[in-house]
Amino acid sequence: MRPDIPPDHILQIGMGFWASKTLLSAVELGLFTQLADRPMTGPELEKALELHPRATYDFLDALVSLGLLEREGVGADGRYSNTPATALYLDRHSPQYIGGILEMAGARLFRFWADLTPALKTGKPQNEVKISGRSMFDSLYADPARLEQFMDAMSGVSMANFEAFARSFDFSRYRTLVDIGGATGQLSCFVAGHQPQMRCASYDLPVVQPIAERRIREAGLRGRVTAGSIDFFEDDFPRADVITMGMILHDWNLDAKKMLIGKAYQALPPGGAFVAIENIIDDERRQNIFGLLMSLNMLIEFGEAFDFTGADFRQWCLEAGFARCEILPLAGPASAAIAYK
């Protein structure tokens, strides 16, 4: 072994699933929610979470070493508490909770990613479709409870991006927005909340509309935000000054992406804007690690689906007739890819 080229980076990545599953199990067990009110000792957490004594301290201290818990003291008298980040993002009662996507990762994606190699060799999805023959979306929409869990997962992971867009995009020229594939109506609610002149509408499949209507009502925005139903493959898009799609384009193959962009172009007035909020990959395909790995996740979930670069988006939109494009960085690895008609 050469001391000037240590293997640490290789080993850290190769065994990274150890740390990943430790966090996913902690979220599944509700550990961070359990610690929301007060620090707790190992024996207290062992009882509350029904842990086996053999596992307790390895589990909790591994989370301390990973920077996901804090601890004062040692042994049975040591008291564990959330870090500022886990208190904010992993307590299920926090408005900023992002654990939904991690719950879904633990329940579904962790096992499907074990079949990445077959996906790389075949280009075919490796999720429920291998067993049932039904796509992920078919399975989701057939189960209302699971559908709402999925919507919550997507809302948690999208929250910071949608709020950043609502705050930072220049809405001064616009008055109406339609969000296609809007799920719970979250993006529309953020825009209406931050931009008083905007009237927004969230469109998704009919089974999703009642969920969106309830969330809009809970947000106190019924007069500013509406919910409607659409099959965006079959139906024309409603007309609006701004048309958004949050984490939608990456679910589909190239032909479907171009078709959806074309529908957006047709529904916009001159000067209107089409916005795709995604984990836009940098044009050199070197820096946005999350975006690149998300594209592999799309392979596992859908086969032909993929994430894309800003240059890809610009090419497709110019082909559709748009006049110009720009990329607006949002939160973390996400950006808003914007095309102006």
Image: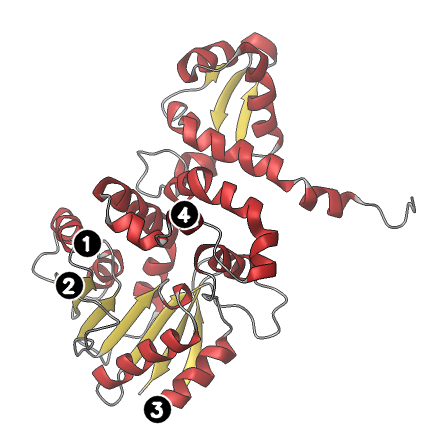
**Image quadrant in which you'd find residue 338:** bottom left
Mark 1: give few (<14), some (14-19) or many (20+) Cα within 10 Å: many
**Element class at badge 1:** loop
Expressed as whole percent of the image width and height from the top left, the position of residue 281 reads 53, 68
Question: How many angstroms separate mark 3 from mark 2 (CA)?
Answer: 27 Å
The amino acid type found where label 1 is placed reads Val
Mark 4: give few (<14), some (14-19) or many (20+) Cα within 10 Å: some
Q: Earlier in the sequence, mark 2 or mark 4?
A: 4
In the rendered structure, find residue 88 and report the number of the disc placed on it. Answer: none
The front one of 111 and 69 is: 111
Q: Earlier in the sequence, mark 1 or mark 4?
A: 4
Question: How many angstroms separate mark 2 from mark 1 (CA)?
Answer: 8 Å
Q: Residue at x 47, y 59 (%)?
A: 298
In the rendered structure, find residue 321 and report the number of the disc placed on it. Answer: 3
Question: How many angstroms separate mark 1 from mark 4 (CA)?
Answer: 21 Å
**Element class at badge 4:** loop
- Whether residues under marks 1 and 3 lie with C-beta atoms below 8 angstroms apart, the answer is no
Expressed as whole percent of the image width and height from the top left, the position of residue 197 reads 16, 70
The amino acid type found where label 2 is placed reads Ser
**Would you name the residue on which mark 2 appears?**
229
- Whether residues under marks 2 and 1 lie with C-beta atoms below 8 angstroms apart, the answer is yes
